[in-house]
Image (cartoon, rainbow, N blue to C red):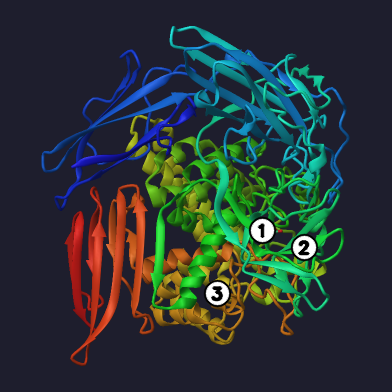
Amino acid sequence: MEITEVLVQSVDKPLGTGGHPYFSWKIISEEKNTLQQNYRLTVTTQDGHVCMDTGVVSSRKNAYVPYSGEPLNSRTAYTVMLEVTDNHGETATAVSFFETGLLHREDWQSNWIIAEKKRKKAQPGFGKQFPSTLFRQSFPVKSGLKQARLHATAHGVYELYINGAPADERCFAPEHTVYGKYLCVQTYDVTKLLAAGSNAIGFHVGDGWYFSPNAKPNMKTDNQHAVLYQLELLYENGERQLVSSGEDAQTSEGPVVSADLYAGELYDAAREIRDWSKSTCREGQWTPAKVKTYGYDNLVPQCGDRVIAVERFPVKDVLRSPRGECILDFGQNLAGRVRITMPLKEGQRLRLEHCEVLDREGNYYNNIMSAGGVGKGCDQTDEYISDGADVSYEPHFTYHGFRYARLTVDGKAPETVDPAWFTAVLLSSEKKDVGSFSCSDEALNRLYRNIRYSQASNMLSIPTDCPQREKAGWTGDMLVYARTAMLNEDCTVLFSRWLENMSKEQDRYGIVPMVVPENGAYPMTGKLMNLMAGAKGKATSSGWGDAAVIVPYSMYEVTGNTEVLKRQYYCMRRWCDYIIRQAKTEKPKDCKRPDEIEQYLWDTGYHYGEWLVPSQSKNGLDTKNLKKIMAESSCYTAPIFGWYSVSTFAHISRILSEEDPTQALYATDAPKYAMIADKMKEAIQKGVIGSDGSMPSTLMGAYVLPLYFDLVPEAHKKRFADDLVRSIETNDFCLDTGFLATPFLLDALCKIGQEDLAYRLLWQTKAPSWLSEVEAGGTTIWENCFGYDEAGNPGTLSFNHYAFGSVADWIYRNVNGIAPAEAGFGKVIIAPKLDGKLTSASRTFDSVNGEIASDWHIEERNGAKHFCMQVKIPCNCEATVILPSGKTDSVGSGVYSYEDEI
Ligand code: BGC
């Protein structure tokens, strides 16, 4: 038995951790049926002082074990020692390491600095922002350097350069957060980039989210790019040296003339200052930096999940459109930008305008410009002005959602284009890929890839709704997709940070806003919505604010992570209290329900309802009708999602009180919230579901949600099942659920014994359906199943929204049959459900215990069909394998082959 992958805060040997890390590891063994029996974890300083020693803990827990020792010090390296004994009596040990960042405000001996020159306020749209800022500082390094750590952050987004070269491949540091309360600090190991003698450090700073007129963080800014950095050098002889941001730094304008995350970037190569981040720099007009007192209270160390280039796509085709445009087709819709090496003459302007789809004739088409007010300024345009030198350019401070880019040079389509001049770069937060899927059906394989690409495109610093229009952390989108996301990539670090930011945005009523970090573009709309609904506080909606409970719970379901449940506990609790209070104190104007029912129904305020139910959004979202459309489904989504949050929270309190019986709060909360959830359920059964078993709406989702969540009284189950089946039949076996009901649709069908119908929906190729997007050539998941109208014209909604991709979770549990029997996949059920169409399917999932795999195919031998399956179970995991004939086997870790006649 061996220990592998000892991670600290989900990262291998991280630098710059916070003061409360957690530990995870895996064990592997040749021996079958291996389980961890006990572990002992110690954390020591480099000189051997023991800061934490768990002693021998008899437990199978091998992930998210919290640090529980004496307080950790700043900028200190710690050794992690782990000893594990398995159930066969074998013992293994492993050693790892982590280093803390700056944990206290007193650790900062540097000043925030800005450029002297006043900047104006950026406006939305291409070319309407102001130049980037360069900060540079030279400093001497003596010989005998042992270690150099740089801690840095900025107002805006920065790129770090040392001695003339980029010091890190990351983009958009310091990330998208609730800046006033939570600003990330990155820690870099720059030891190898420095040499004895004269050195220099440089920061190239652009607007990012901080100053974006579209992202509009909810706070006042003075429009000045700012940086804060502290370079800490340690010499072999123990001597320390500090290089701090302060008046010694110089500033200048950068080569980016104008840049915005939504609008695009205008870059003038003639403005580049040669060797600007070298100590030998002699060019440019530099002015001393000005010190500011922005403070240190909001600084939070960040480790892991940098935004980086995760894949590159060459040009698939250079297209000439009927309008005579030159359009580069990269063959894949994605979030990112284009790297350009096209030779240009001095003064020539190369322009790329990015878009996701072409119009029916094959011309450039910007599908986001007319999507209400939210598309304003989303020009997705980059322009490069050449200085005559070789071009090697990738935009610095923008990214786009695109598959195509219209190319012009000096306003004209160039006659000859070498495809090798352009590469599309997919940007995403760095996460571990934990899943794979393939099967005998190419359309389903493409659907899987579309889901993965929509996920990759929308996990850039925060989970976003779409990469081309809003780039916003819409909470509801993540609520419906979180479980699927975690089955594809380990999003723990990204989601944990986003959830911490959610807590920061929660208002005094306990309200979790629709978007995290809040975006100035929405509170106004939000205020209006509240006004219409007569609600107080920040604008929210059922199914969106509920992300406060459901996202951490989904993370727990996939990885057994109780740490995130503890860290988010108060945020969840306050959100549930808000729902409970709203239900109790508010009632609709003409409400006739008796008080004992009404007080447990969340049925007032503003709600999006299911959102984007295909039959409702078929012809775009008519703002005039929006209120009516939403009301049609919010009459059931609000009470049901309210109950969903409160009952899940009660369950979470129970899980935590079992894990830590000393915490009285968990123990008292569990029965208290369970009782309220029961009352809410009863209220739904008596106040939403009619006494004859009817629902207040005949939308598909109205039957899906109560069936999936076991909210239907026994007497009405048959009617609900019939109504759901009928709603599908009358809809020509196409999808008609919105964001909130789609993740539960196929499961609800399985629950009522309609597996065949579930597969029929999955295989449907007519719109609206999942495969209709594949048939239409989609390479990502669309916001609206009707991406194109009947005449073939693309609509104005996004072609890269992950919400409907939540179907992958069902596919993994049914096609491949891998379903957790307990949170974290310590126990699993492997039971593929054959549909008569697929002849093979393979899935791997790298759980917190290691890789679980199910790989099956159907073989014809002597006129009989055989189902052959290989299953892989990692250590610390137990599986129940159920074959199509119903034969069952219980196994522990190991690789097993099965055959079954079908
Ligand atoms: C976003 C969504 C979001 C929705 C709220 C849209 O504009 O793109 O995905 O959840 O608004 O209804």
Residues 867 and 637: in front is 867
Say which quarter of the image contains residue 182: top right
Residue identifier under label 1: 422
Asked if residue 526 lies left or right of residue 876, the reply is right
- Where does the image place residue 175, in percent across and percent down from the top left? 63, 38
Q: Name the image quarter holding the C terminus.
A: bottom left
Any part of residue 744 in sight: no
Task: Dividing the image into four quarters, tell me where ligand 1 lies.
Answer: bottom right
- Where does the image place residue 474, in percent across and percent down from the top left? 65, 52
Determine crowd level at label 3: few under 14, some 14-19, many 20+ residues with C-alpha closer than 10 A.
many
**The residue under label 2 is which amino acid type?**
Leu
Asked if residue 100 lies left or right of residue 61, the reply is right
Residue at figure coordinates x 34%, y 47% from the top left: 848
Report the Cα–Cα distance between label 2 and label 3.
Answer: 32 Å
Residues 531 and 496: in front is 496
- Give the numbered dot on residue 407: 2
Asked if residue 73 lies left or right of residue 875, the reply is right
Report the Cα–Cα distance between label 1 and label 2.
Answer: 10 Å
Q: Residue furthest bottom?
A: 863
Q: Are marks 1 and 2 in contact (CB under 8 Å)?
A: yes
Residue at figure coordinates x 54%, y 62% from the top left: 684
Report the Cα–Cα distance between label 3 and label 1.
Answer: 31 Å
Residue identifier under label 3: 770
Asked if residue 240 lies left or right of residue 133, the reply is left
Q: Nearer the viewer, mark 2 or mark 3?
A: 2
Q: Name the image quarter holding the N terminus.
A: top left
Any part of residue 121 in sight: yes
Q: Are marks 2 and 3 in contact (CB under 8 Å)?
A: no
Q: Are marks 3 and 1 in contact (CB under 8 Å)?
A: no
Per the image, label 2 sits on a secondary structure element best described as strand
- Where does the image place residue 412, in percent across and percent down from the top left? 85, 64
